[in-house]
Image: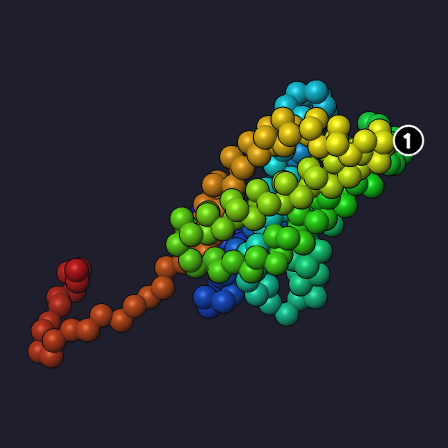
Amino acid sequence: MSSALARLSDKIWGGKTIDEILSKRFKLFVLFGILFTGSFWAYRVVAGIELLPNLEWVIPTLVTVGSFSLPLGGNVFWRSLNRYFGILALASVIAFDLILFGPGLWHVWVFKWSGFVFAWLLGMRSKLYMFDRYKRLLGSTLLTTAIAILIFDFWTGVIGCGLWIGSFWLSFIGQIPFTLYHLASLIFIPPLVALAKLLVKVKVPVAVAVRSGLRVSLGESWR
């Protein structure tokens, strides 16, 4: 049983080379992003649309996963999954809107869905290096996500709502408290970046120089 679990763990988590290991782990990161974004649909169903409506983890996840990139091997499926991750992740949000509210609010959905796509594309432009220090990655991702939220809220709350009610000025004033509340979604960034750093933490064997003539007996550890 233990050997079977070890083989399964190595198949999912390990690999023969560093590139293979990193490729597998980044695939897990992309899958986690899709599942985590999809869980927003279940959360809304259980909690209801009125509970913390502007606290969401869709934009933070889209930006964080989109900001990082690692080779996923030559498999066409995984390359496509990484490239179109944002579209796949948004499928759950689109399903939630259509199932619970129907297509009648199309004028709202057009701005909301396209706003999420803007956030994903903004994240993909970051091109962050996953091996940088955590604080640096965290700062860059927080800034990019904050900009994405501001763009999303301006697009949906000011432009979209302004066209609907006929007053961009009233929409702008009314959107300010919602945007300040929406920025609280940045709380999801630290654990997401920490997960990315954890996944690329791979032990690399390093040769240790030993003075000529120095013997290390069997069972003795070299420190």
Split into 4 quadrants, where in the image is the C terminus? bottom left
Whole-percent x, y for residue 11 in the image: 53, 57
| Coloring scheme used | rainbow
- Check disc 1 and give the amino acid type: Gly
Query: Is residue 43 left or right of 184 when viewed as pictured?
Result: right
Given residues 128 and 36, the one toward you in this image is 128
User: Does residue 206 lie above or below 153 as drawn?
Assistant: below
Q: Tell me, yes or no, if residue 24 can be seen here.
A: no
Position of residue 205 measured from the top left corner of the image (x, y, whole percent) = 33, 66
Residue at x 54%, y 37% (from the top left corner): 186
Q: Quadrant of residue 93?
A: top right
Mark 1, Cα crowd under 10 Å, few <14 / some 14-19 / many 20+, is: few
Q: What element carries label 1?
A: helix
Nearest to the observer: residue 215 or residue 65: 65
Which residue is located at x 85 percent, y 31 percent? 166
Pick the front one: 48 or 106: 106
In the image as oriented, which residue stretches furthest toward the front? Answer: 169
Q: Name the quadrant containing residue 126.
A: bottom right
Residue 14 falls left or right of residue 181: left
Q: How many marks?
A: 1
Residue 147 position within the rendered picture, expressed as x and y whole percent measured from the top left: 60, 45
Circle 1 is placed at which residue position? Answer: 104
In the image, farthest residue toward the right: 104
**Residue under the point 46% across and 68% down:** 17
State the residue at coordinates (80%, 37%): 160
Q: In this view, does 83 lie to the left or right of 99?
A: left
